[in-house]
Amino acid sequence: MSRLLTHPHIRDVTVAAILHALSDPLRIGIVNELLKSRRGMNCTETALRLKRPMAKSTCSQHYRILREAGVIASERKGVDLSSRVRAAELEGRFPGLLDSVLQAYRKEASAAARTKRQP
Amino acid sequence: MSRLLTHPHIRDVTVAAILHALSDPLRIGIVNELLKSRRGMNCTETALRLKRPMAKSTCSQHYRILREAGVIASERKGVDLSSRVRAAELEGRFPGLLDSVLQAYRKEASAAARTKRQP
DNA sequence: CGCTTAGTTCGGTAGTATTGAACTATAGCA
DNA sequence: TGCTATAGTTCAATACTACCGAACTAAGCG
């Protein structure tokens, strides 16, 4: 399994792949949670934090896409897989990109929450 | 025709849709050219500038996706359709987002060009 | 070893993207 | 008016991707 966790070299990471990986509401939510936690997190915990139940296989696939796009790195920690955002590497390669995307996402999310409270 | 050009209100534009629209190399290339030209451009001219021949339908669809995502605005100018990036509006809604994406794209593109010259 | 937990892979279904071919819209000109 | 050329759109078929349940693999613990 571990040998199947492919992490592209930061030089091989493309803008298109990153944007595609983040263009799914669930995946950008995952990245947001991973960044907030500031430590590795597994699939179950992420789904819990997102308050968005999903099948294990679905979660696994989303993590795979994020991983193959170079957005996150995963490693085995005992029984579970711990993932973290490759923030520093990405910042080095594409300065400001991840930040502005996440900032936009958070702005949108908080606006949506506001609208929900007072419809 | 013209009545079929749907432009979402800037408030309805989502991060996911923008990122998806820009996650295609061709589409982000189109946006880049539109920004460089600083004026409206039609499909044929864009394809010409990108040095990437493509079917009319393909071009049309890419423009539609960009348009429906709220990235560009199009209007009829005689025979052709003139499109421009909704840069100011996007900047107001998601500050820095478009800029950093385009900056990343340009960095990647120039790096690729360099590699090509000295393989 | 068997049992539990965490992820991955597989197979099928549903929705979306992409493309060439056919169609529509506009302009120019006799 | 009609004819013709040019620019985009729509259509139908194919290809891709998301999603899920079920079966499989990996690691820890008794």
Image: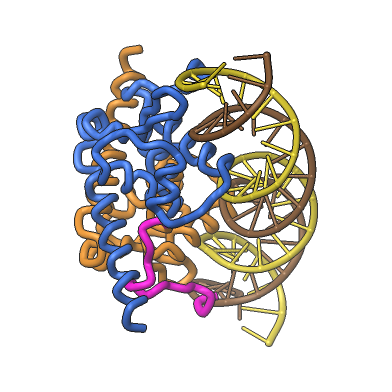
Chain colours: A blue, B orange, C brown, D yellow
Residue at 34% over, 26% down: B112
Q: Which residues are magenta?
A: B1-16
Residue B88 vs residue A76, the one in the foreground: A76
| For residue A44, above or below residue B21 | above
Q: Quadrant of residue B16?
A: bottom left
* Residue B72 sits above or below residue D25 on the image: below
Left of D26 or right of it: where is A88? Answer: left
In depth, the one of A75 and A96 nearer the eye is: A75
Q: Is residue B2 magenta?
A: yes
Residue that appears at 28% across and 66% down = A110
Q: How many marks?
A: 0
Q: Nearer the viewer, residue A51 or B60?
A: A51
Q: Position of residue A114 (x, y in %)?
A: 29, 74
Residue A66: x and y in percent read: 43, 37
Q: Is residue B42 visible?
A: yes
Residue A40 image position (x, y, % from top left) = 32, 33
Query: Is A73 within the magenta?
Result: no
Q: Quadrant of the N terminus of chain B?
A: bottom right
Residue B64 appears left or right of A97 = right
Residue depicted at x 20% and y 59%: B95
- Left or right: B4 in relation to A46: right
Residue drawn at point x = 46 percent, y = 65 percent: B68
Residue D13 percent across, percent down from the top left: 79, 50
Q: Is residue B30 visible?
A: no
